[in-house]
């Protein structure tokens, strides 16, 4: 059987170094807010080409902390609106809602799956204060167009880079493409820890200092509390593990791109559509997503032949019970995609023979 993702095999490649890092933390006797977090923050900021990185508890909190910081700065307040794609992982919307801001959904592009700037324009109102650009499945969102809109209306542009560590656009990596960026290091991500972890990356010094305080009970100095903050800190163990894995991120992303290129060149089926990739380096293939009208058929055929797949995502956010108030809104592209998308296995430790087996199986699918 070829599992959708084999995390044990992924991490086994670096097991010795990971164990060494974990032992170093155990032996240090220091587990929260220490050298390992500081080291990883420096390394990851440098990797992104940005000035600051703040390690936080997870990706959801990274987005929340950016928005909370802008609220502390007075750039937005409760009841203001934030535009984001309707076909993202729900965390993007939850972060907005949890700050007392209103998520306003935009539809997406049928070929790239990313947010459609034309739809964003339609959603701008007097209350709009920010746009969240999700680099969905690992591909950089249409950042130039979004930047133009943000500048025209004086909005903050925030990257949700949870699926796109290391993707490059015009010579710049994610984390350095907008006002601030949120990353997740959830184990399945391109850069994944062995537990929950996340980060905020920015070139904005004031934002950096507020996020840092907010992530630690609103305090940058012990028992001096400037803000009503959270407890959301990258712990020493995850930081040490992430420092090990960061060294291999470029290599891993290269392997992801090679597998994706193989799929794109070798999957031929009249009932299957592949997605378009405009610039090769702007996609780090967190996921490889194909489309077919008979998704249930393809899914069970692959399963019966030993290949696990997943669906990202089976339901656009306005169709989730949590966003019942948006249920009547119409997002024709996202609604079409939710019924057609299927993610096939793609991870660095997938072997060439597994990749070609998956291709052959797909090409031999009898869609009846
Ligand atoms: C994973 C993910 C998040 C949330 O990250 P967590 O670390 O799981 O909280 C947010 N946005 C997107 C697009 C994601 O894929």
Image (spheres, rainbow, N blue to C red):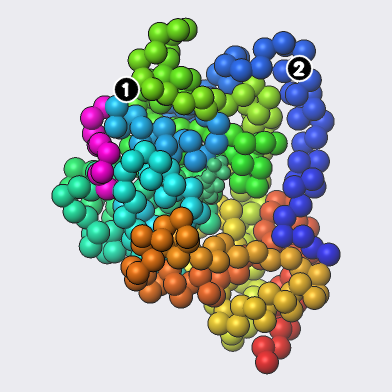
The answer to whether 135 appears left or right of 19 in the picture is: left
Ligand 1 neighbours mark 2 (CB distance < 8 Å): no
Disc 1, SS: helix
State yes or no: discs 2 and 1 in contact (Cβ < 8 Å).
no
Between marks 2 and 1, how big is the CA–CA gap? Answer: 34 Å
- Residue drawn at x 76%, y 52% as measured from the top left: 6
Whether residue 49 is visible to the viewer of this picture, yes or no, is: no
Q: Quick one: 286 or 93, which is closer to the camera?
A: 93
Does the segment drawn in magenta span residue 357?
no
- Residue drawn at x 23%, y 34% as measured from the top left: 75
- Residue drawn at x 41%, y 32% as measured from the top left: 65
The N terminus appears in which quarter of the rendering? bottom right
Residue 196 sits in which quadrant? Answer: top right
Q: Percent x, y for residue 279?
A: 45, 58
Residue 259 sits in which quadrant? Answer: bottom right
Q: Percent x, y for residue 8?
A: 79, 45
The answer to whether 247 appears left or right of 161 in the picture is: right
As drawn, the label of residue 206 is 1
Does the segment drawn in magenta span residue 78?
yes
As drawn, the label of residue 121 is none
Q: Percent x, y for residue 253?
A: 61, 48
As drawn, the label of residue 26 is 2
Which region of the structure is painted magenta?
73-82
The answer to whether 107 appears left or right of 291 in the picture is: left
The residue carrying pointer 2 sits among few (fewer than 14), some (14 to 19) or many (20 or more) residues within 10 Å by Cα, namely few
Main structural element of the magenta stretch: helix, strand or loop? loop
Q: Is residue 242 above or below residue 168?
A: above
Disc 2, SS: helix
């Amino acid at each position: 059987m070829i599992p959708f993702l084999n995390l044990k095999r992924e991490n086994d490649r670096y097991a010795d170094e990971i164990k060494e890092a974990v032992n170093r933390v155990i032996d240090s006797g220091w587990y929260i807010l220490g050298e390992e977090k500081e080291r990883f923050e420096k390394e990851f900021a440098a990797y992104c080409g940005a000035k600051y990185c703040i390690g936080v508890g997870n990706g959801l909190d990274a987005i929340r902390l950016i928005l909370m910081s802008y609220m502390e700065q007075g750039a937005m307040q409760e009841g203001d609106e934030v535009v984001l794609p309707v076909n993202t992982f729900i965390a993007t919307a939850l972060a907005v809602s949890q700050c007392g801001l209103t998520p306003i959904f935009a539809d997406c592009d049928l070929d790239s799956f990313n947010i459609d700037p034309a739809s964003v324009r339609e959603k701008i109102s007097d209350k709009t204060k920010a746009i969240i650009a999700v680099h969905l499945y690992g591909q950089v969102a249409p950042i130039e167009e979004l930047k133009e809109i943000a500048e025209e209306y004086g909005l903050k542009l925030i990257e949700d880079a949870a699926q796109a560590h290391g993707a490059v656009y015009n010579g710049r990596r994610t984390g350095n493409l907008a006002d601030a960026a949120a990353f997740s290091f959830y184990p399945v991500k391109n850069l994944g820890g062995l537990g929950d972890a996340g980060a905020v990356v920015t070139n904005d010094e004031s934002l950096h200092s507020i996020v840092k305080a907010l992530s630690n009970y609103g305090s940058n100095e012990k028992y001096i509390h400037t803000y009503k903050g959270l407890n959301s800190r990258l712990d020493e163990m995850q930081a040490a593990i992430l420092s090990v894995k960061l060294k291999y991120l470029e290599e891993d992303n290269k392997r992801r791109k090679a597998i994706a290129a193989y799929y794109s060149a070798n999957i031929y089926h009249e009932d299957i559509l592949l997605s378009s990739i405009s610039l090769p380096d702007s996609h780090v293939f967190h996921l490889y997503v194909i489309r077919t009208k008979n998704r249930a058929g393809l899914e069970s055929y692959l399963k019966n032949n030993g290949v696990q797949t997943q669906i990202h995502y089976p339901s656009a956010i306005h169709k989730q019970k949590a966003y019942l108030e948006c249920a009547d809104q119409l997002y024709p592209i996202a609604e079409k995609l939710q019924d057609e998308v299927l993610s096939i296995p793609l991870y660095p430790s997938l072997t060439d023979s597994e990749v070609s087996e998956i291709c052959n199986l797909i090409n031999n699918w009898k869609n009846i």
